Amino acid sequence: MGTLVRECTLADVQALQEISRETFADTFGAVNTPMDLTHYLQTAYSLPKLRAELSDPEAAFFFIYRDDQLAGYLKLNFGDNQTEAYGPDSLEIQRIYIRQSFKHLGLGTHLMHKAFEVAKRLSKKRIWLGVWEKNFSAIKFYRKLGFSQIGDHVFVLGSSRQRDLIMAKDL
């Protein structure tokens, strides 16, 4: 069984939109109103927005494949592109998603190792992320990898205000 991680390019924008919408809806659809979810998926993952993100020199996307099938993706932010001001020595994992049919195969760990590799290549001293406070399996996964909570912030999805835990790991 082969696993491949590769950086995304502008040519991948359609596939990125599809997997982004699918995995976000699978993860958060049941806990948000259909109207809020639809609006978020249409705006956060529009083709112009994704093209801009893919073109940003302070962001990087990676696809992960399992047996030649697109199984998930990772989005990293660094420099001024981070969604919170944790400084130039930090790298943010903004998105890490695995398709339902590929969960529990170790692919999330592969993507996290890619994030660590990029952070080290860019001489970052800390890696951090935000995770919904009720996503207990993700929180457990991040703790297993050495992350601990350093703060929180509010994530707004339509009419819903949700609390994300900020978790970080020093490298």
Image (cartoon, helix red, strand yellow):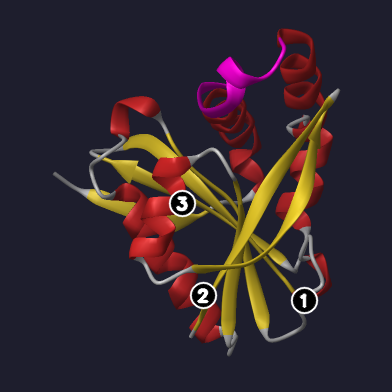
Q: Nearer the viewer, mark 1 or mark 3?
A: 3
**Residue in view at x 44 percent, y 56 percent:** 6
The kind of residue tagged 2 is Val
Please, which residue is most extreme toward the top here? Answer: 34
Query: Does the CB distance between marks 1 and 3 fall below 8 Å?
Result: no
97 in relation to 20, above or below:
below
Cα distance, mark 3 to mark 2?
Answer: 22 Å
Q: Which residues are magenta?
A: 25-33
- Counting residues from the start of the chain, the first of labels 2 and 1 encountered is 1
The residue drawn where x is 64% and y is 31% is 17
Residue 155: horizontal and vertical position, in percent?
A: 77, 42
- Quadrant (top left/top right/bottom left/bottom right) for the N terminus: top left
Depicted 113 relative to depicted 130: above or below:
below
> Is 51 in front, or is 171?
171
Label 1 Cα neighbours within 10 Å, binned few <14 / some 14-19 / many ≥20: some
Residue at the spot of label 1: 79
Give the residue type at disc 3. Ile
Residue named by callout 2: 118
For mark 2, does the 10 Å Cα neighbourhood hold few (<14), some (14 to 19), or many (20 or more) residues? Answer: some
Near-viewer residue (104 or 119): 104
Per the image, label 3 sits on a secondary structure element best described as: helix
Observer-nearest of 119 and 29: 29
